[in-house]
Image (cartoon, helix red, strand yellow):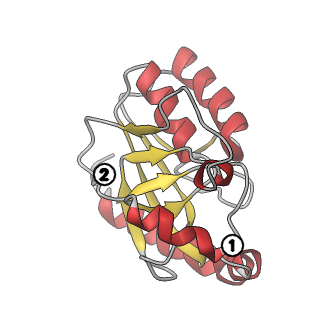
Amino acid sequence: MIVSAGNIESFNFAYPIGVGLIESAINLTRLALFDRPEFLLFIGSAGSYGEYKIFDIVESKGASQIELSFVDKNSYTPIDNVIISEGLNVSHETLVNSSNYVTTNPNYSNFFVKNGIGLENMEFFSILQVSKEYEIPAGGIFVVTNYCDRDAHKEFKQNHKRAMDLLKEYVNEKFRGKR
C-alpha cells in the first residue's frame, strides 16, 4: 500500500494519512488495525541537509527522530530514536530525520550528514514506528524540495509542484505493471 501525507501531497494512487508525526501515526495505526496492508510505501517531499540536490529522488527504509535540542546537548531520550525497516528492497544508507518542525538553521546540517542522516521529512519516523509495531515491511521514496536553511519554506513552495510531478512519475515508472 502506498501512503502519503495528504493535503498538498496527495496522489490518486496513495492513501493520505496526515501531516506530521502525530496525525500520520494515528491514521496509519487505524489503517493497520482495520485494513492491514502487506507492505507500506510512504512517498513525499523532503528537505536536504546538503548531501542531496533539489529534485533528487531518494529511497530509504531508515528514519531517525532527533530534535535540535539533542544536537545542542540540551536534551536526551531514553527511547530508541532510529528505526530501520526490514523486508522492502529499498536502501537504508540514508536515514530520514523526522520532526514536527522544519530545520532552518544550516549549522545543524553537518551533524546530520556526519551521522548518515541526509534528509528531513515530517512523517517518516512515525510510519516506520507503526510498521514495526504491526510487523509490516515499509520504506519511503522522497523527492527533495528544499535545503534545510533559512530559505527552506520559500524553496519548498517554489519547488513543490514540480517535485510532486517528478515523484509521481518516478513511482508510476517503478511500479508499472506491479500493482
Q: Which circle, 1 or 2, is nearer the viewer?
A: 1
Query: What count of labels does the image hold?
Result: 2
Q: Mark 2 points at which residue?
A: 92
Amino acid identity at mark 2: His
Return the residue nearer the eye: 105 or 124. 105
- The circle drawn on residue 34 is none
Q: Which residue extends farthest front? A: 73
Q: Check disc 1: other Cα within 10 Å, few if <14, some if 14-19, many if 20+.
A: some
Q: Secondary structure beneath disc 2?
A: loop
* Residue sitting at x 33%, y 46%: 179
Amino acid identity at mark 1: Asn
* Residue sitting at x 69%, y 72%: 105
Q: Is residue 34 left or right of residue 88?
A: right
- The circle drawn on residue 105 is 1
Q: How far apart are marks 1 and 2 (CA)?
A: 25 Å
Asked if residue 114 is positioned above or below residue 67 in the image, the reply reads below
Q: Is residue 86 left or right of residue 18?
A: left
Q: Where is residue 28 in the image (x, y as percent from the top left)?
A: 59, 30
In the rendered image, which quarter is residue 156 located in? bottom right
CB contact under 8 Å: marks 1 and 2 = no
